Amino acid sequence: MNKPIQALWIYTIWSLFFYLARTDLPGWEGINIAMNNIGPTVYGANSITHAVTTNIPDGYDSLSYIWHVNNDIFRFQIYHTYNESSFTYEWSNDEIGHNKVHVCLFVGPFILIKCNSTAVFVNDHIPVNVQVQRTSGVWLKTDIFPLGTVNITCNILDPSAFFINSTVTYSWTSGDIQGYFNTSINATNWIFQHKYISTGHYTIKINASATGPNSANYFGIASANITIYEPIQGLIVEPNNAIENHPINLTASCNGTAPVYFEWYITYGSSCQFDDQNTTRMTTLNEDLCFSMLQYTFNNSGIYCINVTAMNLGGGYLMKSLLHINAPISPAITATVAAVIILIIVSLLLIYIMYTQSTSRKRRIEVANFDYLFSSSPDERSTFRKFTDWFTTRKTRNQNYSDHQPLLYDNDSNYGSFASGKLDSNVYEL
């Protein structure tokens, strides 16, 4: 009989016998065996499996625990204890993959009470874990980070301390343009920082290598996908003034990577005390821009507090703004103000017209023609015409001449004649 068939035959006989035996033992119906192990691990390393038994009937101080791996019941270990037992096993490279560790509880040498098992996975490589965290603050998403520096934690899973004295070499790429890095440390845990200068999706890759105490070389790899967002910055809420009972557009603008979720809270008063009864709450979502517009009508004048929270996958930003709502101006006041403005405009226009006319007016000199006062004698007409031309020239040259004398004199006997001897020595004004 070969070994697998023999093992199956013996295990079947034991199971039937022990099943009949434990049904005859009162008080053991609620017995329970809980198991756990510290895997996963690598071949060549040990794993430790624990078993804890509960609901043991009174009167039993010592129980027997028989352990074995997979279906090999010929290789087993027996521990005599009460409600707890542990099993240490070194895994070979023939056992890479999924395995099971079994334990059976006995009373006395042959009475089986109950069996249980747990799975153990044996790796052919180093189990590596990588975790990315924010340098500050907390966010619900574990793969979304604001633009800037992140903390990267890398560790190898070594529950049995197999690599505790080994030098572990870590090499990694950040997924951006900054390239490839590596370091060698005598530790299974490594924490470092990296600064991302551009938004986008990145894959962090970690490679770990070490030599075990059995002189075997082990390798492991892990990766983490992250998204770098530009956080919300520079949130501005406008306007600051509005008119009662007139619809206005409330706007919130900011810098940040879309999509952006906006939450509006509007309440009366400058103290910004938001409660359920007197607060209006509204939400908007912009898939493309860091911008929100909300049309709202204020039914009463006064000061209102507006609280806006803008959030994207990289974080949130809160801004409070005070809005002054003014009462509308009455039609009578509006008409009066309009009339005053029109009057001022007309007055300024008239002043401008008068000014332009006064600056463009030219001096005119009027010259009297005395030909009609004298006879048609050629000599007399010639004399007065010369006099007229000469007088015009002299008057233009000297405007400040003050000793003006009449050019003509009037009496009964000689009307319209000019004074003799005055033409060559004086200038006369008409």
Image (cartoon, rainbow, N blue to C red):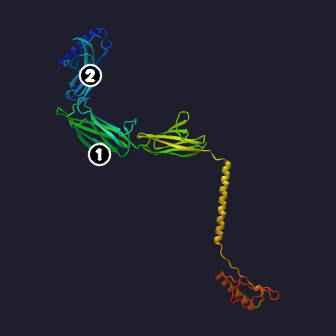
| Residue marked by disc 2 | 50
| Residue marked by disc 1 | 179
Residue at 66% across / 53% down in the picture?
Answer: 337
- Locate residue 185: give its quadrant: top left
Name the amino acid type tagged 1.
Gly
Viewer-nearest residue: 125 or 407:
407
Tell which circle, 1 or 2, labels the residue nearer the N-terminal end.
2
Residues tagged 1 and 2 counted as in contact (Cβ below 8 A)? no
Which of discs 1 and 2 lies nearer the camera? The answer is: 2
Residue at 66% across / 84% down in the picture?
Answer: 394
Percent coordinates x, y for residue 324 in the rendering: 57, 44
Quadrant (top left, top right, bottom left, bottom right) of the C terminus = bottom right
Viewer-nearest residue: 349 or 418:
418
Q: Which secondary structure lies at badge 1? A: loop
> Is residue 408 depicted above or below 289 in this figure?
below
Is 355 on the left or on the right of 117, as rendered?
Answer: right
**What's the distance in space between the residues labelled 1 and 2, CA to CA?**
45 Å
The number of discs equals: 2
Is 313 on the left or on the right of 302, as rendered?
Answer: left
Mark 2 residue crowding within 10 angstroms, few (<14) / some (14–19) / many (20+): some
